[in-house]
Amino acid sequence: AASGIQELTQLTHEQKMQVFTDLDRLIDDMDLLLIDTAAGISSNVMDFNVMAHEIMVVVSPEPTSITDAYALMKVLSLKYSEKSCKLVVNMAASPKEAQDVFRQLELVTDRFLDIHIDYLGCVLRDDKLTRSVKQQRLVSDLYPESRAGRGFNDLARRVVKLAPASRPKGNTNLFWHHLVRTTPM
């Protein structure tokens, strides 16, 4: 949405219902659906997070990103009773820096929140990523052996393993209706 579709960041109740209905139509034809939400704790971001089978929080080593990630996990834990999420560290200078970010967040969530975070992996800072973005191509296609390419490929393998072996059958609209009805707008 930040790339030009601002309306997606401010969905009305009716628009949310339409998105959820459209997702219901698509879900049976997919093995995995990944939804990239905006940063923050807006009602749209929270709605998509609480409907997910798995929540993946993406954080960079910058203090504002770490603070935003903690705020998201805090709201997920305290307001929505979420008990776990996965953490991906993006733009880390090294695997050690990524692990340090994870440990920092794990320390504060263990101490102050009733939510467990699992480290899913990292994507390292890489000039090849900038080049691939300029060419509008996937870094994992253009530069599969680059730091970022390997990071995305490793992350993709881990995400596929998270996919539930079986999904509930049938229409989930009742769940969506309940979710939108009980979530503050």
Image (tube, rainbow, N blue to C red):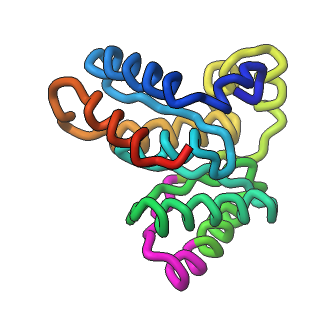
Residue in the foreground of this view, choosing between 140 and 118 = 118
Please indicate whether residue 82 sits to the left or right of residue 108 in the image.
Answer: left
Instruction: State which quarter of the image contains the C terminus.
Output: top right
Residue in the foreground of this view, choosing between 21 and 153 = 21
The answer to which quarter of the image holds residue 61 is: bottom right
Number of numbered labels in the structure image:
0
Please indicate whether residue 55 sits to the left or right of residue 130 in the image.
Answer: left
State the residue lying farthest toward the bottom.
Answer: 111
The answer to which quarter of the image holds residue 65 is: bottom right
Q: Position of residue 127 (x, y in %)?
A: 84, 36
Which residue is found at the position 43% from the left and 25% from the top?
Answer: 17
Instruction: State which quarter of the image contains the N terminus.
Output: top right
Which residue is found at the position 64% from the left and 54% from the top?
Answer: 89
Please indicate whether residue 177 sits to the left or right of residue 72 in the image.
Answer: left
Q: Position of residue 25 (x, y in %)?
A: 32, 15
The image shows residue 9, relative to residue 184, as above or below, that is above
Q: Which residues are magenta?
A: 106-120
Which residue is found at the position 55% from the left and 62% from the top?
Answer: 75
Q: Is 113 part of what is drawn in magenta?
A: yes
The image shows residue 164, relative to residue 117, as above or below, that is above
Which residue is found at the position 53% from the left and 85% from the top?
Answer: 111
Q: Is 49 part of what is drawn in magenta?
A: no
Residue in the foreground of this view, choosing between 131 and 88 = 88
The answer to which quarter of the image holds residue 136 is: top right
Q: Position of residue 88 (x, y in %)?
A: 58, 52
Residue in the foreground of this view, choosing between 81 and 59 = 81
